[in-house]
Amino acid sequence: MRGRAFTGRLRPAALALGAAGVLTLGGGAVAFGADGPPADTAPADSIDLGLRAYDVTFAPTAAGAEPVTRSMAVTMFHHDPNVAVPAQRLTFSAAGMKNVAEVVWPQGCTVTGADAVCTVPGAPVGRLDLPDVAVKIRPLPGVAAGAKGSFSVSHRNTNGKTQTFKPTVTLADGPSLVVGRAAATTLAPGANGDVPVTVTNEGNADVASVQLELRWSHGLTPVERFSNCVYDTSRDPRQGVDRTVARCAVDQPLAAGASYGVRDTVSMKANADAYAESVDVTAFTPKEATAHPAGEPGTGPALHLVPVPGGTPGADGRNDTSYGGADFTVTNTADFGISAPEVTGANGAQVKLTVHVDNHGPASIDPLEYFTPVTRFDVRVPDGTALVEWPVTCAPRDTAKRYLRCASDTESDVERPVTLYSGKSYDFPLTLRVTSTGMHRGEAALLTTGPNRIELPFDHNAANNTVALVVKTSASNASATAGSSGSSGSNGTTGSAGSSGAVSGGAGNASLPATGAGATRLIGGIAVGAVAFGGAVLFTARNRRRTA
């Protein structure tokens, strides 16, 4: 699988089995009192879990050489951030690897012959990925190119559903480019940092040239502009997020077994809105190279590679080693707040109350974990009203629909990038029916009270993390719909089934389109569809809107 599904920095929740401890996320909540929402649990058979695994290709091991070892990470994931997932079991069989490669199982697995059963620690509330299972694979000496093996990995939900994947291990002649990934570096806003670039040809054949792609996340700006690179600073055409991409034609050979670094420094500057950032580097052989994008050629010296000792740092434990780079933690903050203009409607009428999650900056925030929302919040529906319609990224937490837990999107596209940019807002329109006269109050609160403020570690101002939701009845008894005050974006307004969702603050925000109930199967408030990428199956979220 080439590249990444998202252009900002993501922090994978990857733990080898047997590692000490599992990070626990607590969930702050509105103080709802004794009649509040249920606990964050769900029956084990109601949790729908998916698997991700990838194929691996090695070059045959030369006589007398040490075989290359790679860790194939197998990841379990689910779709509902409102529930905790108990520990799970994965069943492996390596019978198909006989005479091709050796498999080393993680600690804590029960091994019987070529099979193993591994226990995977569960996931707390707010986390969608379970810890990775890192299976080490090493080709056997003397095995020739063309040999192929496979092993199976299976998971059985308590509801009887079984998923099985069969990743393959192939030995093939030719070049194989591996890119290093450096440990995270801490920067201050406005400071410069260096990007270590290391490329190793782990194949058994030289390559005549290489194409490097460098991708800076939105909070970083490249300093050098190499003359053999073309720079594209337009918004990502698939995911709608800001970034800078450079494709560089490096016309020099890379010898089999040799490692290379950049002769001159590759550096970047942390922008004022930077927080958790990355520079991704991908290496392509001439057969894999893609056309240069539209953009501006650099005017500085050419990017040139020189031999370096020591191999490729950070290559082990990553499924796709053709890309690497570096992560950067910027010492910045983002003041998240929650707001909702009060609305007025006649008794019996439907009103639209929109809850806004506002980023007052200075940092722009990406998801800090894979498939995890930027923000979540709890809602107590105002008394004297009934919930009629809500975004699909919200889920009722009781049968009477008096309480909701809402989350921002976990998948990005052009219209709804998951990044919450500084000065922008996520909008969550709720349709309520007024059931009595008077002043009706509810409440919404950001989830902020996890251990070490893990929910919003960047938000140091708690004063604006709670808002009263107010619905007043008007003198008229007409059953017209009253809309909340505030701005709406180019995607329209929410309301009737099938309409699109409102966006506040212009481009760069999440919108939550609407649909009638039953139009799409919903799992934990998220409509999902399976998409296959190579040896992996991922689930992509699609925003819809639910009705009572």
Image (cartoon, grey):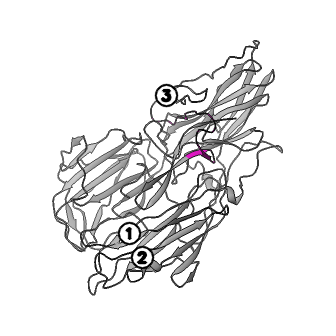
- Which residues, given as a range, are shown in magenta? 508-527
Tell me how many marks there are: 3
Q: Residue 85 at what x, y percent from top left?
A: 65, 59
**Label 2 sits on residue:** 137
Q: Which amino acid type is shown beneath numbered disc 3?
A: Asn
Q: Quadrant of residue 441?
A: top right
**Label 1 sits on residue:** 56
* The one of 390 and 185 positioned closer to us in this rendering: 390
- The residue positioned 62% from the left and 60% from the top of the image is 123
The 10 Å Cα crowd at callout 3, few under 14, some 14 to 19, many 20 or more, is: some
User: Can residue 530 be seen at all in this image of the molecule?
Assistant: yes
Question: SS for tag 3?
Answer: loop
Q: Residue 450 at what x, y percent from top left?
A: 65, 53
Mark 1 or mark 3, which has the lower sequence index?
Answer: 1
Using the numbered discs, state the Cα–Cα distance from disc 1 to disc 2 in whole angstroms: 9 Å
Mark 3 or mark 2, which has the lower sequence index?
Answer: 2
Disc sitting over residue 491 in the figure: 3
Q: Is residue 111 above or below residue 517?
A: below
Q: Residue 214 at what x, y percent from top left?
A: 30, 52
* The one of 244 and 65 positioned closer to us in this rendering: 65
